[in-house]
Image (tube, rainbow, N blue to C red):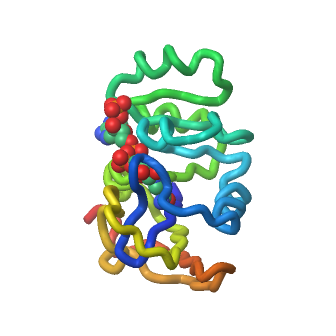
């Protein structure tokens, strides 16, 4: 699995169940990278999407109550509700690559399965941020590439250190 996240330098990723910033460069990169694959997200992130599903991708939504959520997804194409127990089985039928796109609870749940991360660092200060990224990359990942994006954003690509698997 591949993780994708945007955060500020304090690790803020969300506020009021929304993204606290809007960078079209980041959204375009996200779209380009994930198109034709599968995006895996938590139910809060699904609720936060202004347009559902994310088009031309399978949308997998993690919830502890998959039947209840599935009932709301009947008319939404390529959207699947699943609990963590059935995730791997469901993903065998979903197009690769499989991207973990948040939020915090799902990053925490799936980090052990993620072997690379694309991180956009944004320059904003966010007072009253209420959702932070759950860990630092240093212990298990190494920086493979870093590039400047427009508007003061920075893109970092991390790869898992081989010795960190199964820790
Ligand atoms: N900056 C970024 O890149 C980025 C990306 C995505 C999201 N975000 C932000 O992050 C925030 C949302 O993050 P969040 O941590 O509150 O929520 P989340 O991870 O999106 O979703 C949490 C939900 O996932 C389900 N879940 C959690 N653990 C589970 C498990 N073990 N098995 C099955 N289902 C499980 C539960 O759904 P049920 O309650 O239905 O059981 C839980 O309420 C928002 O502010 C959003 O805008 C930021």
User: How many numbered discs, if any?
Assistant: 0
Quarter containing ligand 1? Answer: top left
The answer to whether 157 is drawn above or below residue 47 in the figure is below
In the visual, does 130 lie left or right of 24? Answer: left
Is residue 64 in view? yes
Is residue 85 in view? no
Q: Residue at x 56, y 41 (%)?
A: 49
Q: Quadrant of residue 32?
A: bottom right
Q: Residue at x 32, y 62 (%)?
A: 128
In the visual, does 112 lie left or right of 23? Answer: left
The answer to whether 93 is drawn above or below residue 41 in the figure is above
* Residue 142: percent from left, percent from top: 43, 81
The answer to whether 76 is drawn above or below residue 33 in the figure is above
In the visual, does 50 lie left or right of 136? Answer: right
* Residue 102: percent from left, percent from top: 45, 51
Of 93 and 16, nearer the camera is 16
**Where's the C terminus, which quadrant?**
bottom left
* Residue 87: percent from left, percent from top: 44, 36
Q: Quadrant of residue 29?
A: bottom right
Q: Residue at x 55, y 52 (%)?
A: 99
Of 152 and 128, nearer the camera is 128
Of 134 and 112, nearer the camera is 134
Q: Residue farthest to the front? A: 127
Q: Residue at x 61, y 44 (%)?
A: 38
């Amino acid at each position: 699995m591949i993780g994708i996240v945007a955060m500020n330098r304090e690790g803020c990723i969300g506020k009021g169940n929304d993204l606290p910033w809007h960078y079209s460069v980041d959204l375009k990169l996200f779209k380009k990278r994930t198109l034709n694959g599968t995006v895996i997200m938590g139910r809060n992130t699904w609720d936060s999407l202004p347009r559902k599903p994310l088009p031309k991708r399978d949308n997998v939504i993690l919830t502890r109550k998959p039947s209840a959520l599935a009932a709301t997804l009947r008319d939404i194409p390529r959207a699947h509700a699943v609990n963590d127990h059935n995730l791997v089985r469901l993903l065998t039928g979903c197009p690769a690559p499989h991207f973990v796109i948040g939020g915090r609870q799902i990053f925490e749940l799936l980090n052990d399965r993620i072997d690379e991360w694309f991180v956009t660092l944004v320059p904003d200060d966010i007072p009253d941020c209420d959702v932070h990224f759950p860990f630092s990359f240093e212990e298990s990942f190494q920086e493979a590439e870093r590039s400047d994006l427009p508007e003061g954003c920075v893109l970092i690509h991390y790869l898992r250190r081989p010795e960190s698997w199964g820790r």
